[in-house]
Image (cartoon, rainbow, N blue to C red):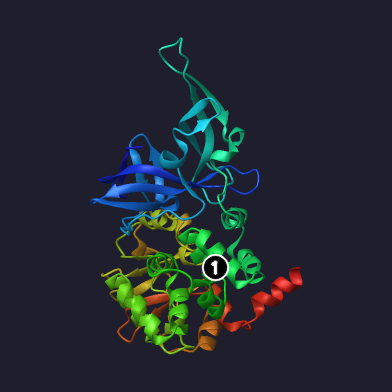
């Protein structure tokens, strides 16, 4: 506690105040969900997935982005300083908690490992201490509600499998579970549900929580959800969103359904021709990118946010791994075709299949990159609307 919060460049932008943990699955250690920090006189939440390193120098972020919405704890979330430190365990008191890097090889982050207990003795001036494993004092981290316990059980399941579980629940239980989920996990779940189920699930969320969840969704999935909302609800949400984010969403919503523009995401990796292979690999390593997006780097003239400067080509990750780190991207470009935002879903699918691409750039008439369409989104759009339900029925 009290360590600095550092931006991606290493400059201090705040200070850590607490650690947010949630109970794990049965027999699994409590997991660090994120950190409460103060920055610009605000008490904010920093998701653990957005922290690249945590050591004595502080918590360093992976990217320059930071969410300044005020922190508000949800059911099932435990703050170490508030809820754990100084709590009595028999005739002892919790004086510290040890964290360790998670070892599951998938999601990274940290989990609770040990708890330090202190005992005061009238015959001694200083207390005595002992370390115990977290599961020796499970009540300190136990879920406080049935919904929080269920959210913990589902936490490490694939979002598609979680969606199958959620769809089998009555609506009231679905909403209770949604309340207990963290924002990122709920966003992942929404992306795996049909839009009508999404709308029913978020009806019980207040506007502040809803905005936090929507902010975690992929642009194309969020555009699909907003398109299904009643006009007045969509307008209220867009008016409350960050100005730049709202502008992006309004642009995506302007494209006709069934076209490449309605299917694309503007959130892709874009660099200039003078950027090096080493710089490109540093971007690709960021775990926040979807696998299909991180499979290639699009190269354009500046600016590097959609709509970019003139599109020059693409460099796939296999090529990046073969070239010298100092090589400039302009020297290893593939000239793969792009598509216009007015192209139909069918044309997009044919193009991706013809050229065996994971993602295809979408450019306007001036040759500026507007975004990209990934193969997983094309599959989602071209498969029958009930394909998820039929797959789950077959699996069961």
From where the camera sits, is residue 229 visible?
A: yes
Q: How many numbered badges does the structure rendering display?
A: 1
Q: Is residue 165 left or right of residue 306?
A: right
Q: Is residue 296 left or right of residue 133?
A: left
The percent position of residue 143, horizontal first and vertical second, equals 57, 49
From where the camera sits, is residue 306 visible?
A: no
Q: Residue at x 54, y 35 (%)?
A: 113
The percent position of residue 335, horizontal first and vertical second, equals 42, 74
The percent position of residue 382, horizontal first and vertical second, equals 59, 83
Q: Is residue 53 left or right of residue 154?
A: left
Count neighbours of disc 1 (C-alpha within 10 A) and say few if under 14, some if 14 to 19, many if 20 or more. Answer: many
Q: Nearer the viewer, residue 327 or 348?
A: 348
Above or below for 65 versus 111: below
Above or below for 22 versus 154: above
Above or below for 237 versus 155: below
Q: Nearer the viewer, residue 178 or 248?
A: 178
- State which quadrant residue 214 falls in: bottom left
- Residue farthest toward the top in the current orientation of the protein: 123
Q: Residue at x 39, y 81 (%)?
A: 233
Quarter of the image for the C terminus: give it: bottom right
Quarter of the image for the N terminus: give it: top left
Q: Residue at x 46, y 55 (%)?
A: 74
Check disc 1 and report its element: helix, strand or loop: helix
Q: Which residue is mark 1?
A: 175
- State which quadrant residue 66 falls in: bottom left
């Amino acid at each position: 506690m009290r360590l600095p919060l550092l931006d991606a460049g290493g400059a201090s932008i705040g200070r850590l105040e607490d650690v947010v943990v949630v109970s794990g699955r049965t027999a699994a250690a409590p997991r660090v969900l994120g950190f409460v920090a103060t920055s610009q006189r605000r008490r904010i939440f920093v998701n653990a997935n957005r922290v690249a390193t945590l050591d004595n120098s502080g918590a360093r972020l992976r990217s320059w982005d930071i969410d300044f919405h005020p922190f508000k704890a949800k059911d099932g979330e435990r703050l170490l300083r508030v809820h754990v430190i100084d709590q009595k365990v028999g005739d002892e008191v919790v004086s510290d908690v040890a964290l360790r890097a998670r070892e599951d090889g998938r999601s990274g982050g940290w989990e609770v490992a040990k708890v330090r207990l202190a005992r005061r003795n009238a015959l001694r001036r200083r207390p005595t201490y002992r370390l115990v494993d977290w599961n020796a004092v499970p009540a300190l981290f136990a879920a406080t509600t049935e919904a929080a316990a269920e959210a913990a059980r589902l936490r490490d399941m694939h979002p598609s499998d979680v969606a199958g579980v959620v769809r089998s629940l009555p609506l009231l239980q679905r909403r209770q579970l949604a309340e207990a989920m963290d924002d990122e996990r709920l966003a992942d779940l929404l992306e795996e549900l049909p839009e009508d189920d999404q709308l029913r699930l978020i009806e019980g969320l207040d506007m502040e929580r809803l905005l936090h969840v929507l902010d975690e969704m992929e642009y194309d999935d969020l555009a699909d959800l907003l398109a299904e909302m009643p006009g007045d609800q969509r307008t209220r949400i867009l008016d409350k969103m960050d100005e730049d984010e709202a502008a992006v969403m309004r642009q995506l919503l302007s494209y006709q359904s069934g076209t490449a523009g309605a299917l694309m995401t503007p959130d892709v990796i874009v660099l200039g021709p003078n950027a090096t292979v080493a710089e490109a690999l540093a971007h690709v390593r960021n775990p926040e990118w979807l696998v299909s997006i991180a499979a290639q780097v699009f190269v354009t003239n500046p600016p590097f946010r959609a709509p970019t400067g003139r599109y020059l080509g693409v460099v796939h990750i296999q090529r990046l791994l073969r070239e010298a780190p100092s090589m400039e991207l302009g020297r290893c470009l593939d000239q793969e075709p792009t598509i216009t935002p007015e192209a139909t879903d069918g044309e997009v699918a044919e193009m991706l299949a013809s050229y065996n691409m994971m993602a295809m750039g979408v450019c306007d008439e001036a040759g500026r990159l507007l975004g990209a369409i990934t193969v997983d989104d094309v599959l989602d759009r071209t498969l029958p609307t009930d394909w998820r339900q039929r797959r789950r029925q077959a699996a069961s």
